[in-house]
């Protein structure tokens, strides 16, 4: 079912510092920041030869990553995203296995403009996993 | 400096359950478990089209991931590994930027038989990062 690793998301308290880490220290290719108010984050993509790192900073008062940053003030790995060909097929399979889909169980349009779902970390080895239909 | 994402490591309390998650629920290609007593882990690789997931279960009494599992009983994302061409060049660069290398600051032979280092998460956005010389 799952295909490529689309990205790893790392939540950070301060994008400027995190960009410095990736650009200046680790020497990676870093894209300009994009504010995504509808997702409550500002995002910076780090382009690796085989995948992407998504640096996320809270944006606005109801950011979905504020609680994570409060718990992990230095930042940390927030979620990983796998690609699937058909998100409805994925939802049916996951629900048949008892995996809880976050929210109302229906795909949303994610940060890349594609349908996505997130699953409950407790059902998947403590890892917050996003599936994105490619 | 950094090249491909070599792997994401996910520490789990029970490999059998985690393998079931990835094989049966997520439909990924899962390799047989390998015991690596010198690293204090049993590892299972999940092969994705563009990278690998490394599932780690503590092995033995002094496993380096026991404390992580105690803190995260359901498991969780443990570290990410980027590839570098020359680990000595990487060490010099990191130290010049004030990034702390774990242990004695010298590369060790990692789980794939290649020289690796780990850096202090507090210096890199709260993320435990491994560099592997390819």
Image (cartoon, coloured by chain):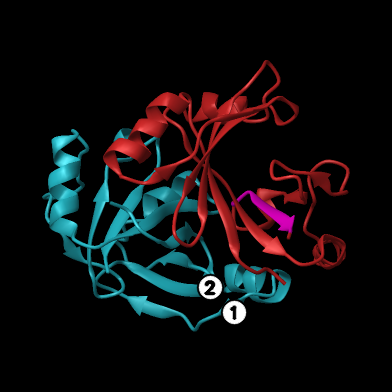
Chain colours: A red, B cyan
Picture coordinates of residue A82, whole percent (x, y): 64, 60
Q: Is residue A116 above or below residue A31?
A: below
Picture coordinates of residue A33, whole percent (x, y): 54, 30
Quarter holding residue B123? top left
Chain ID, mark 1: B
Looking at the rendering, in which quadrant would you find the C terminus of chain B?
A: bottom left
Chain ID, mark 2: B
In this rendering, position of residue A66 left or right of residue B70: right
Picture coordinates of residue B54, whole percent (x, y): 46, 67
Picture coordinates of residue B115, whole percent (x, y): 20, 66
Would you name the residue on which mark 2 appears?
B46
Q: Is residue B114 above or below residue A8?
A: below
Magenta region, residue range = A127-133
- Mark 2 touching mark 1, by CB under 8 A? yes
Q: Is residue B20 above or below residue A101?
A: below
Q: Is residue A130 magenta?
A: yes
Q: Is residue B91 visible?
A: yes
Q: Is residue B74 visible?
A: no
Mark 1 element type? strand
**Furthest residue in direction top, as rendered:** A61
The span from disc 2 to disc 1 (Cα, nearest Å) is 6 Å
Name the residue rendered at 15%, 40% in the picture.
Answer: B95
Q: Are there few (<14), some (14-19), or many (20+) residues within 10 Å of tag 2?
A: many
Q: Nearer the viewer, residue B11 or A39?
A: A39
Q: Nearer the viewer, residue A45 or B101?
A: A45
Q: Is residue B3 above or below residue A64?
A: below
Name the residue rendered at 51%, 58% in the picture.
Answer: A51
The overriding secondary structure of the stretch rendered in magenta is strand
Q: Is residue B8 magenta?
A: no
Name the residue rendered at 72%, 70% in the picture.
Answer: B25
Would you name the residue on which mark 1 appears?
B29
């Amino acid at each position: 079912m799952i295909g490529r690793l689309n990205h790893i998301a790392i939540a950070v308290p301060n994008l400027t510092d995190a960009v410095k880490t990736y650009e200046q220290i680790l020497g990676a290719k870093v894209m300009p920041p994009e504010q995504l108010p509808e997702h409550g984050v500002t995002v910076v993509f780090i382009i690796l030869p085989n995948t992407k790192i998504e640096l996320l900073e809270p944006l606005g008062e109801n950011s979905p990553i504020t609680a994570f940053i409060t718990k992990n003030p230095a930042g940390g790995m927030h979620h990983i995203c796998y690609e699937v060909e058909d998100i409805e097929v994925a939802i049916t399979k996951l629900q048949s296995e008892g995996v809880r889909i976050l929210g109302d169980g229906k795909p949303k349009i994610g940060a890349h403009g594609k349908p996505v779902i997130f699953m409950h970390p407790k059902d998947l080895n403590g890892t917050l996993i996003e599936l994105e239909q490619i």
